[in-house]
């Protein structure tokens, strides 16, 4: 039930968006953005150690299907965790939840390291996923509400792309940890999971210094706290940049509420913004199937069909290409615009993936990895922009839950079915050692990516350089028009200047 506490006219969004980039923003990036490194570490460790988990004596006696099932369990946990913690994030604030979800992840990954049997391992992977899924909702909303509008696109895409820093690190870590001459085979894979918890503790120490979102605070009846936080940020940025900040004229009037009803949130997604809902679903389903199907099982593909005993080097090269793609292409999402870049990266990567499927039988381990690196150089930037889109195009009160909803639905459709589908294809094809039998998975992923790119071309939102409140005004803003076709409202905030 929504409880109105009063009205407030505030210039806080405009003040945050006019800030120059300073060291303080790096605190936000490091404290919050490193969650994707954890996710990349988790996914890659699982993909790299499929062989280590299969022996009954040193592993857990798992089949290729079991490896795929574990990946699906992780993704299922992430979907449910995103929805559960996403709702709590919109209700109780960004900071409380991005501390809680990181704690859930740390505990669950330690439980994974101590798995005595496959059932325990599946359950621990599910719980690990719930923590990571909750992180996606809490972190994306907090980052976009704290980063100035001219930098939001590049920062969000690059941060989401940092998943691949963790992926590369996880790949390289598994090389010594899975070498029986260095570490006992029964302990190596367990140590790999335990290292994730160590990294999580380090992130938690930094994250404690990141403030609550002032945008969340002033909507939920805590305007004085929001003002105090923004004033402190302004003082810090002026000291760090050596620049005197200009005054702002843009304001917005909000009907403050302590809680926002779930029915109001659901109505926003399904009724007020149906085109944006279709857009986000298309982007998330395409990238989720592509990545979860390909990457969760890539190590298994290399070892089963191409005779690779140590997959870590191949996965590290693949991961490095993904991160470099997101990093180098991220500024173009602010300069050329969201629609051109998202549709272009989705369609191009889909076409290239289809080509890889056609010639799959001709690839060696090296050339398949090289082709994958080219494909995902573009795909990683587009996939990262899916999270950017969901966090930008819906009202403030629904932001975290909308991210969670689209992540959960898209990932459930593509991320749960993908690893199971590819695991089944690999098991079926392994008897004949015929890698071409898994090409159908490449074609499905390619079709979904191209479809997502086409939807973006027609329904994409030109959000570059604009304040969040002008893209989608808060539900509690006064004098607003409702609906995506009517514009942002009668009292839009002026968009921030587009960076050169």
Image: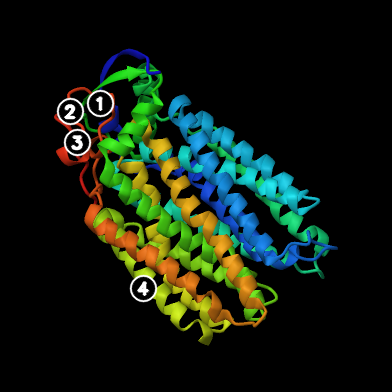
From the image, tell me which residue sits under label 1.
11
- The spot of residue 363 in percent (x, y) is 53, 84
Label 2 close to label 1 by CB (< 8 Å): yes
Going from N to C along the chain, the mark reached first, 2 or 4, is 2
Q: Nearer the viewer, residue 382 or 205?
A: 382
Q: Residues within 10 Å of mark 4 (few under 14, many from 20)?
A: some
Marks 2/1: CA distance? 7 Å
From the image, tell me which residue sits under label 4.
351
Please name which of the two marks, 3 or 2, marks the residue nearer to the observer.
3
From the image, tell me which residue sits under label 3.
488
Name the disc covering residue 249, or none: 2
Q: Nearer the viewer, residue 131 or 84?
A: 84
Q: Residue at x 35, y 63 (%)?
A: 346
Query: How many numbered circles does the render carry?
Result: 4
Marks 1/4: CA distance? 46 Å
- The spot of residue 390 in percent (x, y) is 36, 45
Marks 3/2: CA distance? 18 Å
Q: Quadrant of residue 177?
A: bottom right
Dot 1 lies on which element? loop
Going from N to C along the chain, the mark reached first, 1 or 4, is 1
């Amino acid at each position: 039930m929504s409880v109105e506490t009063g009205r407030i006219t505030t210039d806080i969004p405009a003040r945050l968006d006019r800030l120059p980039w300073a060291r303080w923003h790096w605190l936000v990036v490091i404290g919050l953005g490193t969650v994707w490194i954890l996710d990349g570490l988790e996914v890659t460790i699982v993909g790299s150690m499929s062989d280590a988990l299969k022996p009954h004596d040193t592993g857990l006696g798992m089949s290729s299907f079991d490896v795929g099932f574990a990946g699906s369990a992780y993704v299922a946990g992430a979907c449910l965790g995103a929805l559960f913690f996403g709702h709590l994030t919109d209700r109780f604030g960004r900071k409380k939840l991005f501390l809680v979800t990181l704690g859930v992840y740390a505990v669950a990954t330690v439980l994974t390291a101590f798995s005595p049997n496959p059932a325990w391992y599946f359950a621990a992977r599910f719980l690990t996923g719930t923590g990571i899924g909750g992180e996606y909702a809490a972190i994306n909303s907090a980052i976009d509400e704290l980063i100035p509008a001219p930098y939001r696109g590049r920062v969000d895409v690059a941060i989401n792309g940092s998943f691949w820093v963790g992926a590369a690190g996880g790949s390289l870590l598994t090389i010594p940890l899975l070498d029986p001459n260095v570490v006992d085979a029964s302990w190596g894979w367990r140590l790999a999971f335990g290292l994730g918890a160590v990294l999580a503790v380090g992130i938690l120490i930094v994250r404690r210094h990141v403030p609550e979102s002032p945008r969340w605070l002033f909507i939920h009846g805590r305007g004085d706290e929001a003002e105090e936080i923004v004033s402190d940020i302004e003082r810090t940025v002026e000291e760090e940049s050596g620049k005197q900040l200009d005054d702002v004229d843009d304001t917005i009037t909000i009907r403050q509420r302590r809680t926002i009803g779930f029915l109001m949130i659901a109505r926003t997604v399904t009724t007020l913004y149906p085109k944006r809902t279709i857009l986000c679903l298309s982007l998330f389903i395409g990238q989720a199937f592509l990545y979860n199907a390909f990457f969760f099982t890539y190590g298994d593909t290399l070892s089963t069909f191409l005779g690779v005993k140590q997959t870590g080097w191949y996965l590290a090269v693949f991961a490095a290409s993904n991160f470099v793609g997101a990093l180098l292409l991220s500024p173009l999402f602010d300069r050329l615009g969201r629609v051109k870049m998202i549709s272009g990266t989705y369609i191009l990567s889909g076409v290239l993936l289809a080509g890889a499927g056609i010639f799959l039988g001709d690839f060696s381990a090296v050339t398949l990895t090289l082709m994958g690196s080219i494909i995902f150089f573009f795909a990683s930037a587009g996939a990262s922009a899916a999270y950017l889109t969901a966090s930008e195009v819906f009202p403030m009160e629904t932001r975290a839950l909308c991210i969670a909803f689209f992540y959960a639905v898209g990932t459930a459709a593509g991320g749960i079915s993908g690893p199971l589908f590819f695991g089944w294809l690999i098991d079926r094809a392994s008897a004949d050692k015929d890698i071409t039998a898994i090409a159908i998975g490449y074609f499905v992923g390619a079709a979904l990516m191209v479809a997502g790119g086409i939807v973006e071309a027609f329904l994409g939102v030109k959000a570059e350089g604009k304040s969040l409140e002008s893209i989608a005004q808060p539900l509690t803003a006064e004098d607003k028009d409702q609906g995506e076709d009517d514009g942002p409202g009668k009292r839009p905030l002026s968009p921030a200047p587009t960076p050169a």
